Amino acid sequence: MYLEFADRLQRSGIGTAASHQRRALESAEKVEVVANPWVDESLSSGLRQLLRGRSALKQFDLAHCNLFGPGSLAVARAAKRRDVPLIVHAHVTAEDFQDSFRGSSTIAPALRRYLRWFYSRADLVLCPSEHTKRRLETYPVTPAVEPVSNGVDRGALQGFEQLRDQYRDRFDLDGTVVFTVGNVFERKGLSAFCELARDLDSADTESGDFQFAWFGPYDTGPLASKTVRRWVTQPPDNVIFTGWVEDIRGAFGAGDIYLFPTHEENQGIAALEAMACGKPVVLRDLDVFREYYTDGEDCLLCETRADFERALRRLSEDPDLAARLGQNARETAAEHSLEEVQKRLSSIYREQLRV
């Protein structure tokens, strides 16, 4: 089960999804997970082994690649050469790659062609949702595509409530805290997040004071888009960008309403984590969210900025509604537990291995 550049991706959704896979399979019978495929534990050492005419990769019965770079390509070729099943996990599409960093939208068409080629090398492609499956089938990719939830590690979130005061004090948060979690990208609804904060800060409202907090890393260097650089350096008065936080439980403890006006997702792990913590969530009305969630039952789905503003006001003014949505959201998150991920992956592996 290979994720190249794992150290660099640990703060990303891809890194979290791969970690969930490994954690889920810890309790699986007759499954031994090898996260590092290289004989000498590194890609560079593996390449040196190849130059010496030796095998660079450990023995394995099935390969499950979570990315699509040179290391994954080497594992894929070894799987084909050894005639063992190859599963490729499509965490990335060209569409969700757009608006991630400066120049990403320009690269996206070429990436789409490469992903079609790389994903088509697999015996089976996994992806986080039916929405992503339908998208991949338009590329098209040639193997069968099966959706598997990225899951949510509910155990890792335990104790978030005890961090509420600490994190609210740390970031000077008060009133109703509207928050999101993850890397700061325009694709994830950065402008909508900030514009909503500005509108609510200037409006006469009976809902009380709103503060907006985005918990997650951001870049202001040469790779940052102009939009990201503008908002994080000159945010509205009631918006804070925390940067990386070492214990993400603090974000879910400090926040009151989870807001995610993203424009494109394959699933959205942080939204599931907010649900697992019993937070009311407000999401953009996307097919991928309607696939898993129900408007008015475990979330509020919004199309326009006015819809988002009304939803935030409703939740602030109606604690019973917020509590009901939060409790239902917790039950929905339980359907995406690591136990469920383990059952699904184990079944898929047995099918591929014909055992």
Image (tube, rainbow, N blue to C red):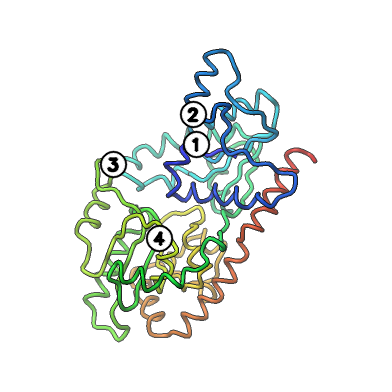
279 on left or right of 223: right
Label 2 vs 1, first from the N-terminus: 1
Amino acid at the residue labelled 4? Val
Which circle, 1 or 3, is nearer the viewer? 1
Residue 83 location, x and y as percent?
70, 27
> Residue shown at 58%/39% (left/top)?
35
Position of residue 213 relative to residue 42, above or below, is below
Q: CA distance from mark 2 to mark 1?
A: 9 Å
User: Residue at label 3?
Assistant: 223
Q: Position of residue 354 (x, y in %)?
A: 78, 39
Q: Is residue 149 left or right of residue 92?
A: right
Q: Which residue in the rendered view is the most extreme toward the right?
A: 355
Which residue is tagged 2?
70
| Residue type indicated by callout 2 | Pro
Mark 2 or mark 3: name the one nearer the start of the chain. Answer: 2
Sort mark 2 into few (<14), some (14-19) or many (20+) by Cα contacts within 10 Å. few
Residue 181: which disc?
A: 4
What separation in Å lies between label 1 and label 4 (alpha carbons)? 24 Å
Secondary structure of residue under mark 2: helix
Q: Are marks 2 and 1 in contact (CB under 8 Å)?
A: yes
Distance between mark 3 and mark 4 Cα atoms: 21 Å
- Residue named by callout 1: 4
Instruction: Give the number of callouts.
Output: 4
Q: Are marks 2 and 3 in contact (CB under 8 Å)?
A: no
